[in-house]
Image: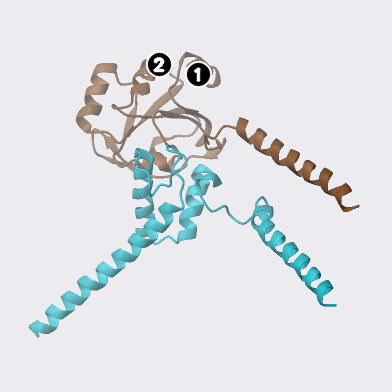
Chain colours: A cyan, B brown
Amino acid sequence: MKILKLSFIIFFIFSFNHLKANNEDLKNKITKNLRCLICQGQSVYDSDSEFANSLKVMVDKKINKGLSEKQIYSYFEDKYGEWILYDPLFNKNTYFLWLLPLLIFLTGGAIIFKKLIKKYK
Amino acid sequence: MKNKFLLPFITSIFVIVFIIFYKGLQDTNIYTPETKINNEIPSFSAKLFPSNEIISSKEIFELNKFYLLNIWSSWCVPCRQEHSFLVELKKNTNIEIIGVNYKDTRVNATNFLNEFGNPFKIIIFDQDGTKAIVWGAYGVPESFLIYNQKIIRKYLGPLDNELIEEIKLIIK
């Protein structure tokens, strides 16, 4: 019985650690995608300014509250504007930005395709 | 025939790219978050300074009254400059000044208030800086003018004589 209890406790501790590590990964991922407003050009993850440190605490709190990554981004976007996110969102202002590379790629492909067809005709 | 179009084409692309980059050079690289005017004030609960009592934002801001929420800290040098203006503004009965003590220690905050005076009706103690984030602030000092549960003005940086006069005009 004692062994069973002990193994249960060990299992519990390990599973808790796992959860904590997962949260830590998520927190790092989110803070890497947030821009520090004090030392602009650095991510919140890299920065050690007062603002960035508070933001890290805030992200931690939000994760513990059970908010998803997307919800956390939209929370900060609401507070500071879209600029705080490194990845611009996909909306009507950014369609052009997101789709331009694809468009260029397709046009290039079409030109190559056309030339190849000409060559083998 | 091909070369006839190629040269103007390349030149025009070069000119367009040059204009875009040249204009980009003149733009400022420093971003300040846009101020959302007439936004509802955020709801939160916080510890008070020095009593440690927990208070919710609803208890702080009543309707039909002007409030100035000022984020300050004893280690912040510009806060020292603006503090005398806040003490002066306190004499105006139309407005209540609420302080948010940002990432400070109790001893330093108390010393600061003893030295420069206390214009605040209540002070929210924000040890980890998260309350400032709730307000969308990112540095000290920052001030928000609030009326009817709405933010009507936001001031980045220290308040000066001119801004205090502006506030006085608004709350008349």
Residue shown at 84%/72% (left/top)? A118
Query: Which residue is tagged 2?
Result: B85
Pick the residue in front: B58 or A83.
A83
Residue shown at 37%/57% (left/top)? A27
Pick the residue in front: B119 or A96.
A96
Mark 2: which secondary structure? helix
Give the chain letter at badge 2: B
Q: Residues within 10 Å of mark 2 (few under 14, many from 20)?
A: some
Query: Which residue is tagged 1?
Result: B163
* Residue A95 placement, left or right of B59: right
- Give the image location of residue A59, x and y in percent: 38, 52
Q: Outermost residue toward the right?
A: B1
Mark 1: which secondary structure? helix
* Residue A74 placement, left or right of B96: right
Is residue B95 in sight in this rendering?
yes
Q: Residues within 10 Å of mark 1 (few under 14, many from 20)?
A: few
Is residue A65 in sight in this rendering?
no
